[in-house]
């Protein structure tokens, strides 16, 4: 059992990391908070497996990715955003972007590119998005991503290959080869 | 054809995952093919853009929300680390060693009873039936 004081400490230490991973997966604040809460609950329910020497953050991250993918798999109706990004997505302001360096033009261009990349990322199927987030966004190795997702390394590499080409095609399509 | 191969490996090159001879081949081809050079630059920008996606801001009330949802449940809902091993009968749970011992005792009893018991009546010899015929 995890004592409440220790649970508070774990929340303080890992909530932000968990939320960042969840938000990147879900692209939505409400779903991200819900996913983080469910992941913490699952970890608590397995409290007998907890010990202080454990990499709690890694465990939580695994749970977040697996819960997310299971949810997506279980959804009877898939509501994926199409790869052709809508005008609304393209013009929506990016709340979290911050780039201190460079001229205003280059900042604007970079922010626009990142907005486009994020919008294209949202359009990927869940399993491909998970691979891209782990390997390309969080810069983890293929082996580590495979461990987190509990897939063979070849599955990660294959999905990543397809995901990158979908992203590339999506970006080239509406940006006029800007990148 | 060569450009298609180049494009299939462009992301791996940009990621630094190719072996030395593959890298050299890619560089030689890129030097001779402007279209592939542009393609490679596009891949590099896209991958750099992915790496630069900012960390999302965490809502200020996230930790409080988690605390209120979780801390109360820490005491209520905890599962044991492993499932209880053994056989569960209504009202009692036997350890595997006890179940094994009980099984062996039952086997010994049943075999000894069949060895010393009276046997099954139908297995006995039938009584001989003697028929007499009267002569004369």
Image (cartoon, coloured by chain):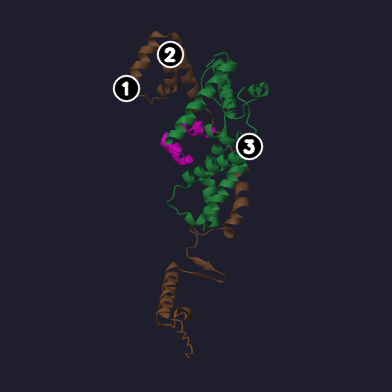
Q: Which mark is on residue A29?
A: 3
Residue at x 42%, y 73% (from the top left corner): B107
Residue A148 shown in magenta: yes
Query: The magenta stretch spans which residues?
Result: A129-152
Which residue is nearer to you in this view: A74 or B24?
A: A74
Q: Which mark is on residue B20?
A: 1
Looking at the image, residue A32 sits to the left or right of residue B49; the answer is right
The tint of chain B in the picture is: brown
Quarter of the image where one finds residue B113: bottom left
Of labels 2 and 1, earlier in sequence is 2
Quarter of the image where one finds residue B10: top left
Residue under pointer 2: B3
Q: Which mark is on residue A92?
A: none
Q: Position of residue A85 (x, y in %)?
A: 63, 23
Do dots 3 and 2 share one subunit?
no
Q: Reply above or below: A120 against A56.
A: above
**Cα distance between the residues tagged 3 and 2:** 42 Å
Q: Reply above or below: B114 against A29.
A: below
Q: Position of residue B47 (x, y in %)?
A: 48, 24
């Amino acid at each position: 059992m995890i004592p409440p004081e220790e649970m508070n400490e774990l929340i303080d230490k890992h909530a932000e990391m968990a939320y960042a991973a969840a938000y990147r997966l879900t692209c939505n604040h409400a779903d991200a908070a819900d996913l983080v809460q469910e992941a913490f609950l699952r970890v608590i329910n397995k409290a007998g497996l907890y010990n202080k020497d454990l990499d709690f953050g890694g465990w939580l991250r695994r749970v977040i990715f697996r819960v997310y993918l299971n949810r997506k798999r279980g959804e009877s109706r898939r509501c994926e955003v199409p790869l052709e990004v809508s005008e609304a997505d393209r013009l929506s302001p990016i709340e979290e972007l911050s780039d201190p360096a460079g001229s205003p033009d280059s900042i604007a261009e970079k922010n626009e590119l990142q907005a486009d990349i994020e919008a294209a990322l949202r359009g990927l199927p869940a399993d491909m998005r998970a691979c891209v987030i782990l390997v390309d966004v969080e810069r983890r190795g293929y082996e580590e991503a495979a461990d987190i997702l509990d897939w063979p390394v070849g599955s990660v590499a294959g999905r990543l290959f397809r995901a990158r080409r979908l992203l590339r095609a999506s970006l080239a399509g509406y940006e006029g080869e800007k990148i | 054809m060569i450009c298609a191969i180049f494009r299939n490996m462009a992301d791996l090159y940009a990621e630094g995952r190719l072996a030395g001879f593959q890298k050299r081949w890619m560089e030689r081809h890129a030097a001779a093919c402007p279209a592939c050079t542009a393609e490679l630059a596009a891949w590099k920008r896209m991958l750099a853009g992915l790496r630069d996606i900012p960390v999302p801001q965490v809502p200020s009330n996230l930790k409080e929300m988690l605390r209120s949802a979780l801390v109360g449940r820490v005491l209520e809902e905890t599962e044991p680390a492993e499932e209880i091993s053994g056989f569960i009968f209504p009202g009692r749970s036997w350890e595997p060693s006890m179940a094994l011992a009980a099984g062996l005792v039952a086997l010994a009893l049943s075999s000894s009873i069949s060895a010393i018991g009276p046997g099954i009546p139908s297995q006995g010899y039938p009584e001989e039936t003697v028929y007499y015929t009267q002569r004369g």
